[in-house]
Image (cartoon, rainbow, N blue to C red):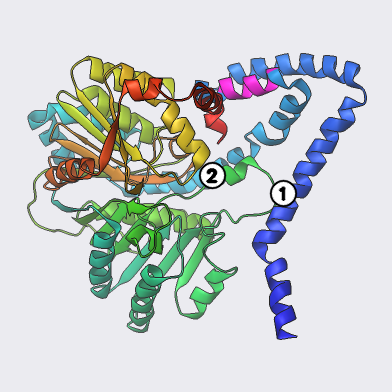
Amino acid sequence: MIFLKKILKNIFNRTTVCIFGIIFQISYFASLCLGMGYYYNYSYILFQALGVVVSMYIVNLDINPSFKIAWILVITAFPIFGVMFYIFFGNRRSSEKLRKKMSPYFEAEKNCLEQSESVMKKIGECFPDFEKQSKYLHNFGCYPVYENTKTVYFSSGEEKFEALLKEIEKAKRFVFIEYFIIQEGKMWNSILDILERKVKENVEVRIIYDDIGCLLTLPEKYDKELERKGIKCRIFNKFKPVISTRMNNRDHRKIFVIDGETAFTGGINLADEYINEFEKHGHWKDTAIMLKGNAVKSFTAMFLTMWNYLDGADYDSYDGFLTSPEYGKTEGFVIPYTDNPLDDEPVGENVYLGIINDAQKYVYITTPYLVIDNEMQNALTLAAKSGVDVRIITPHIPDKRFVHAVTRAHYKKLTSLGVKIYEYMPGFIHSKSFVCDDKSAVVGTINLDFRSLYLHFECAAFMYRTECISDIKADFFKTLEDCREITYDDCLSVNIFVRAIRLVLKLFAPMM
């Protein structure tokens, strides 16, 4: 009987039910398309006309041109299927509902974070090359520039994990955790053991995790299990077996805040492959940043804004958590910032473009996905043609084969115009970092792909003349030792059939 219960539990678990729900919807959608096929001549003419109308509507939307091209291509090639597919899945009604519901929380967050006028004055007088980027992030990212913040760079998941455990042990007031992926194993279980002890010491612990990110890594109702341990937990955008654009908007952020004095972010999720406890796609190379001091306030605000939304709390319910800790005198400036798909402002992409366009000597980039639009490609190639040393490290072993094929589809154009591409041979590189001219750097969660830049909730730390920038540059060159350069001649030698597949996938990259 117990054995039978286990079998039934595995058959009817949440993942299986969701998969069958989605298959049912796809089947229903396909039957509608086939039903139209019985009246092919009439339906074809109708949908050709409707396709023209929908295409004109798409052309006039205020969205990235690559999205427009992909949708129009589908509608043109498959009039009946394409139009219905767009009507079912291409509309933005779900996003509009989410936008309306979340906007008051983002407004409250803006109001609670004030920019120091003396800091902006100092930047304007002493660092004019940083002024443009800092003003943009403040005016449109709505996050202040901070002084007196210590920055510590971690070149691997193992380094971050070791430091994180030590910092959690110091917690006296609260611990806030917001991650895309949490998985039971050595990393998370070690953290959870400390958190359980901290709860007994009256430390408040709150956790947010993304439901799709954790769909296969955490058991169903794991939030209830944490609540029984005294840990408050909320789930972002719970996954339902309904195909909807709403499912595109994921919480891809990685935020760990301790007492409002220490914060971590970067590419490293709370799962064992990120610390190479086991090999998932070869050796996993990732990075993170730790902040101590004034700038932690912004990460605390980011977390609380998302928490208040998920909890249904008052818009400005920050409960005295937003302190401004003083670390002491440090060099440089730090701007923690977030990007979201609801404000029609691609902050993450614009920060990257700003770094590339301002580069005088070099810009070095690590990214797991190089799925870029024409604007980003032009910025990279223009910098290279202007004599800037532009180098990009991508993985050799992919985690998503189709996305990796699109990444490689960009190599030929980039290398032909002077951008240097390297693949990390031991495995998968998941870090998302930019470093430029020994002056500025970004470490965060924002990939160079359409999902990160336009659909997900993301975060990062922009650093200018901080102590860790030399460490980021040094790690880039150390990583290059394990990389192979991909030349223009290498791209030309790729099988023509493989090149053709890559180009087709590239056209549909915005939909991936």
Q: Which residues are magenta?
A: 68-76
Q: Which element is circle 1 on?
A: helix
Name the residue at 53% across, 66% down. 218
Is 199 one of the magenta-colored residues?
Answer: no
220 left or right, relative to 293: right
Tell me if I can see residue 29 in this picture: yes
Residue 8, image quadrant: bottom right
What is the chief secondary structure element of the magenta stretch? helix
Q: Which element is circle 2 on?
A: loop
* Up-down relation of residue 412 to residue 296 (above or below): above
In front: mark 1 or mark 2?
A: 1
Tell me if I can see residue 313 in this picture: no
Name the residue at 75% across, 42% down. 26
Q: Give the numbered dot on residue 328.
A: none
Nearest to N terminus: mark 1 or mark 2? 1
Front residue of 142/498: it is 498
Q: Quadrant of the N terminus?
A: bottom right
110 left or right, relative to 420: right
Give residue 173's position: percent from left, percent from top: 29, 72
Q: Mark 1 — residue?
A: 22
Name the residue at 40% across, 57% down. 304
Q: Amino acid at mark 2?
A: Asn
Q: Mark 2 — residue?
A: 249
Give residue 276's position: percent from left, percent from top: 34, 61
Residue neighbourhood size for the residue with mark 2, other residues' Cα within 10 Å, grouped as few (<14), some (14–19), many (≥20): many
Give residue 215's position: percent from left, percent from top: 56, 59
Compute the Cα span from label 1 to label 2.
17 Å
Q: Amino acid at mark 1?
A: Ile
